[in-house]
Image (cartoon, rainbow, N blue to C red):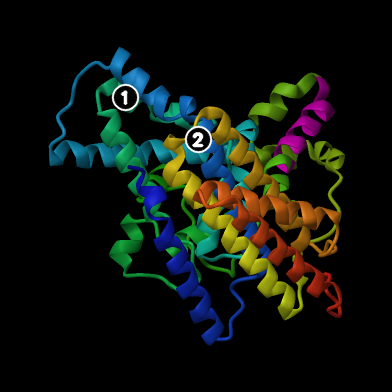
Amino acid sequence: MNPIVLSIPIFFLLIGIEWAWSWYKKKQVYRLGDAFANIGCGVVEQLTGLFVKVFTIALYSYVYHEFRLFTLPTTWPWLILLFIGIDFAYYWAHRMSHEVNLFWIGHVVHHQSEDYNLSVALRQGALQKIFTSPFFLPLAVLGFSDEWFLFLSAFNTLYQFWIHTEWIDKLPAWFEWLFNTPSHHRVHHGRNAQYIDKNHGGTLIIWDRLFGTFAPEEEKVQYGVTLPVRSWNPLWAHWLPVRDLLLQVKAASGEFHQALFRSPTWIAHNRPQWFKALHYTGDFGFDTRYPKSLVAYALVHFAWLIAQSAVLLFTVDAYSFGVQLLMVLLILAQFVWLGHLLEGQKVFSLSEWLRAALAAFAGIWLFQAPMWMGFVLFAAMIGWAMGLKNVQAVNAIRAQ
């Protein structure tokens, strides 16, 4: 069982509690478009992860069964040592994801949000595991069980969910010295000059203290990456870093190896001309505001889309590879359309008809309900969209 998939209901419960607390305290921590993009990126990562297990689960298992030097016991002392080893390997995988431009395309997705809340924890890059999984293979060679490796790796990931919040200030000094905390991780998500490429630890922060990448939280953190994404489309969030790397390699010409394997920070300081080819427009603070009717419409469709994704993840083994691929593509298409809607696209249009049809029939298929229910659901969605057509200012109003 995948502890991360099983934790999905808890994730959404805690996100709801944080949102409600922020609303009660009258502090804007969540924005609809940004939260949608964060969770959408997480769903993209989980769904595409169904097809890249060869780079993660299968790779570790193969090395363990074919090349391990020892067969280590699964007693508590050894499992604690394995967890520490996983966290140590995670530190270096995470650090190299910041310091190697090629690896950065897999990790930058996690840093694109300009907010900082629990939904940001779900914002993960679909390509990241391809680049980071080799860092854990020494554990397989040493003989740590593949099953326990996968289980404890999941808990290393789960630990990092709660540190994505602004509501928890600094904790007791002993805890801050040893463990990763919200304060330490806020620094990691900062684009402030003194915060870039700092605090890479997963569960433990001691690796950063040992290897010189630690920075305390001092001045107010400005979240996001140095080149703003300005989009709520989770697939665009994944494609943009790949496009940027290709443009940098092209601009680098004979120095393409520098564009691939130097750090983004080194490139910014030593080859700023490579960034001129990226064609970024606009500043930070991208936002969109909506009438209440459109907020309700988007939330209902988003909830239905999350339900489809959850059912597929929980029942994936019941489907053939072809059906899995088809369902993933249908869900991803819905995410793209809903992202466009939240960016200000016209609500009632041919594209909205198509998206509503996908939402209705893909969901009915996954829930194994009678087909006539799909037609009823489709009619209800279209009727709602037609009702929104005449709402004043139904399109999103750009704040900036």
The range drawn in magenta is 240-253
Residue at (59, 45) in percent of width and height: 44
User: Does residue 156 appear to the left or right of 200 in the view shown?
Assistant: left
| Rendered-image quadrant of the C terminus | bottom right
- Which disc number belongs to residue 50? 2
Camera-side residue of 357 and 131: 357
Q: CA distance from mark 1 to mark 2?
A: 22 Å
Question: To which quarter of the image does residue 332 belong?
Answer: top right
For marks 1 and 2 on the same chain, the one whose residue lies earlier in the sequence? 2
Magenta-span inclusion, residue 312: no
Question: To which quarter of the image does residue 340 belong?
Answer: bottom right
Q: Tell me, yes or no, if residue 267 can be seen here.
A: yes
Residue 328 place in picture, x, y as percent: 60, 40
Camera-side residue of 202 and 243: 243
Q: Tell me, yes or no, if residue 193 can be seen here.
A: no
Disc 2 residue type (three-letter)? Leu
